[in-house]
Amino acid sequence: MRRSDRIAWWTFGIGIVAVFGGVGVVGMLADPPPPEPPSPHTMDMFCPTEPGGRARADTYFKEIAGPYRGKGPHAVRLLFVNANTGEDAGEFPSGWTADDGGSDAGAKPRVQLVACGYQETAQETRVCEYLPESVARLDWRLSGRTGARGTTKISLLKASYVFEIYEARTARPLGRFTVPGDAACPGSVELDDRASIGQEPHAAKLRKALRPYVERAVG
């Protein structure tokens, strides 16, 4: 083969390799990126909008939750759906509280249960007076004192709550129960323009209803 023919064949071969190599690069660049993992704010989207709906299984709980099995206690996260009540509602014993995957990750057990709370309110039961607290921007309940200057008066509405319990990782429903409201004025409320709030769920009765889910052994 003449030298000019050999050069032509080499040029042709290099061109073919470059073309198919370029196709491969284009193909790799055209692949869609992997889906983004759920962000922490999606935890607030877990609960159905009303009782009896289906919880979402694609929220951040899927990333951080532990399996609901083994000995209790099983850490629980309480989420209220459009509830209008005080700031102290739903405080649990320390052994029941869960790690949310934030800066203190590992300091608490991983969440295994989610309790979705739905509030139903009725007529006014009493008027609560609050004294503004400037640092925390909350109003704190006046203990046995009325008529102090600068107080905020808020009507307290009779309330009851439906709670639906789910496995956090899978959104599998586990049960439901109803808890009455607490007749006492909430200890603190957020300082805003609300003229009324609902009673907080009765703390002792809420813990009693949750205990079988939280403390039982799950096979």
Image (tube, rainbow, N blue to C red):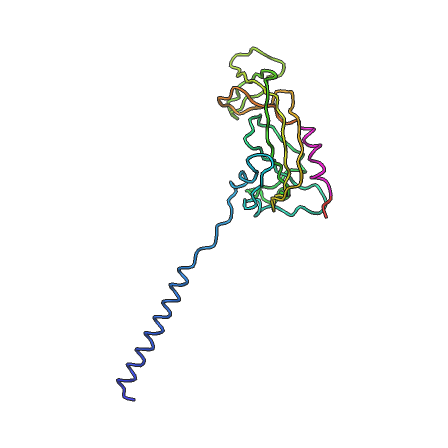
Direction from residue 97 to residue 38 in the image, left or right: left
Residue 106 coordinates in the image, percent (x, y): 61, 45
Residue 130 magenta-drawn? no
* Quarter holding residue 31: bottom left
Q: Residue furthest top?
A: 147
Q: Establish if 183 lies above or below 105.
A: above
- Residue lying at 56% horizontally and 29% vertically, measured from the top left: 83
Range of residues picked out in magenta: 203-216
Residue 99 coordinates in the image, percent (x, y): 60, 41
Residue 81 coordinates in the image, percent (x, y): 56, 33
Direction from residue 203 to residue 83 in the image, left or right: left
Q: Establish if 62 lies above or below 84.
A: below
In this view, the residue in front, 182 or 108, is 182
- Residue lying at 57% horizontally and 21% vertically, measured from the top left: 140
Q: Residue furthest front?
A: 52
Q: Establish if 179 lies above or below 100.
A: above
Residue 23 coordinates in the image, percent (x, y): 37, 67
Which secondary structure type mostly characterizes the magenta part of the structure? Answer: helix
